[in-house]
Each structure stands twice: as C-alpha cells, then as structure tokens.
Image: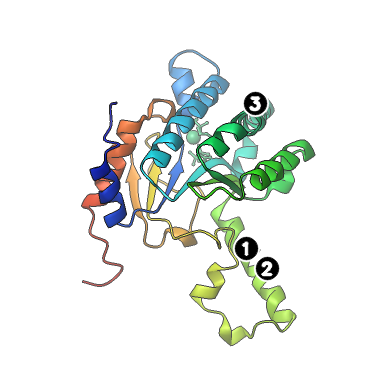
Amino acid sequence: MLYKSSLKNKQKIKEDNLRHIAIIMDGNGRWAEKRGKIRTLGHKEGFKTARKIIKFAVENNIEILTLYVFSRENWRRPKLEIKALMKLFFFALKNEIKNLNKYNIRLKVIGDITFFSEKLQNYISKVEKKTLNNTGLILNIAANYSGRWDITQGVKKIVKAVQKELLDINQIEEQNFSQYLSTSELLPVDLVIRTGGEKRISNFFLWQIAYSELYFTDILWPDFNPLDFQHAIDYFITRERRFGGI
Ligand code: IPE
Ligand code: IPE
Ligand code: MG
C-alpha cells in the first residue's frame, strides 16, 4: 500500500484530535478538459476518487468526512452538466448502499435538497435511514449547500423559536446558535482541504470553519489519491492550534 494506514498514523490522528475533515473536491472539469474529454467524464472520475478517499478515512478512524458535492451556485452550470451530476449522485446512492453498510458508514446529507427531483430526495432519505445505525465514519454530503444559506436558515429557525417563546433573545449565544445550523449534530471542522488550485471557500462552510486548519493543493480532484490525503493530514499534524491563546 502506498500510504501509511498504520497504527502509528491512526494514533497520531487521535492524539491530534483530527476528527472532522471537510473537502472541497474541485477540478473535475479541468481534469477532463485537459484530456480533450467532456467535463462529465471528470465528474465520473471524481466519484472514483471520492470512493478511495472515503475508504482511507474509514481505515484511519476519521470520525466525520464532509464532501462538498454541489453548491447552490452550481445551478449556474449548463443543464446537461447538472443533469449528469444528478444522475451520478443518484447512481452513487443506489450502488453504494451495500458498501456503506459493509464499512459501517452512516450517510448524512446537508443542504437544501428540496431542489432535487422527488426520486433523488426519496433515495437520500432511504440511504440515510438504512445507514442510521452505523457507528463508524459519518459521511456527510453537502449537496445544494452553501454557507450563507446555512446561516440564513439557522437565523429563521432561531427567530421562530423566539417567536414561540421557546427561547429568549438574550439567550442567543454562539453555542446555541450552532445548534440551528445543518451541522448541529456534528463535531467542529478540524481540517478543510481544497483541491484544484483555487484558494477560496466558494460558499462552503463559513461559521463552521472559524478555527479550522485550511489546506490547499493544486492537484485536480480526480488525481487526488490517498497519499495526497495523507500529506494533508501530515500538514494538519504539524500545526499548532492555539484557538486565540498562546
Ligand atoms: C468540482 O469540479 C465538482 C463540482 C463543482 C460539482 P468542477 O466541475 O468545479 O471542476 P473545475 O473547477 O471546473 O475544473
Ligand atoms: C466549489 O467548486 C463547489 C464544489 C466543489 C461542489 P466550484 O468550482 O463551484 O467553485 P468556484 O466556482 O471555482 O468558486
Ligand atoms: Mg470548480
């Protein structure tokens, strides 16, 4: 095996409290275009990468892996590309349910899924339900997600709670506001990885990354392999997280 799926690596990950990794999987389109192929092929290849990366996360006892698969701004893309992405998402859910259970993975989807077809929405709930009792990796898929949307929907929920007098306005604190975000059940994000060369967040987690470590690589997502993932983890391990202290 190319990478260090060793006991030592697992121990290091545990000691350094690397529990939640989030990935902006960027560069599929460019990967395909560089080869004179249609962008969709890059997405298919990107799906294969995701499978390998999920497996690596399982082997290394990562607790939560969030994958940013579709942003709310991605609807600006050509219809055909969107259609292919939806098909791929559906295909992935349908075919991987067995593997999710085999590897004890719990699937969770965050984002406004009401924009998706009914068929896809039903499948998402089905896979979430069928993997609900799995106790290994939480695979959190951010689909039709955006950080600003998440904060906005959280504000709406908290205002409703105030209106219903379940909460007093003076009781609103950072800690309880977090409970109104789509990530309320999850641990804080320790490490964000972005492939594909851009050094921006593209409306992914905003609130959640206040103290996350950020790792950017030029590698296009379809080329990203477990060894590259290990490099990102090694980078995290060398960081001293001060959280404002000294
Ligand atoms: C990321 O790859 C996947 C999605 C946004 C769905 P891109 O499709 O953005 O690939 P590039 O950035 O154009 O190469
Ligand atoms: C971010 O990539 C979204 C996902 C990876 C799902 P984009 O390709 O949409 O981001 P921009 O357009 O380069 O900012
Ligand atoms: Mg992109």
* Residue 118 occupies quadrant: top right
Q: Is disc 3 in contact with disc 1, using a CB cutoff of under 8 Å?
A: no
Give the class, few, some or many, for how many residues have Cα within 10 Å of label 3's Cα (few <14, many ≥20).
some
Residue at mark 1 = 152
User: Which quadrant does the N terminus fall into?
Assistant: top left
SS state under label 3: helix
Mark 3 or 1: in front is: 3
Q: Is disc 2 in contact with disc 1, using a CB cutoff of under 8 Å?
A: yes
Horizontally, residue 234 falls left or right of residue 174, namely left
Mark 1 and ligand 2: say if the CB distance to the nearest ligand atom is below 8 Å.
no
Distance (Cα) linking label 2 and label 3: 33 Å
Task: Give the residue type that dot 3 points to.
Answer: Ala
Could you tell me residue 127's position as x and y percent? 66, 41
Q: Mark 2 or mark 3: which comes first in sequence?
A: 3
Residue at mark 3 = 84
Residue at mark 2 = 156
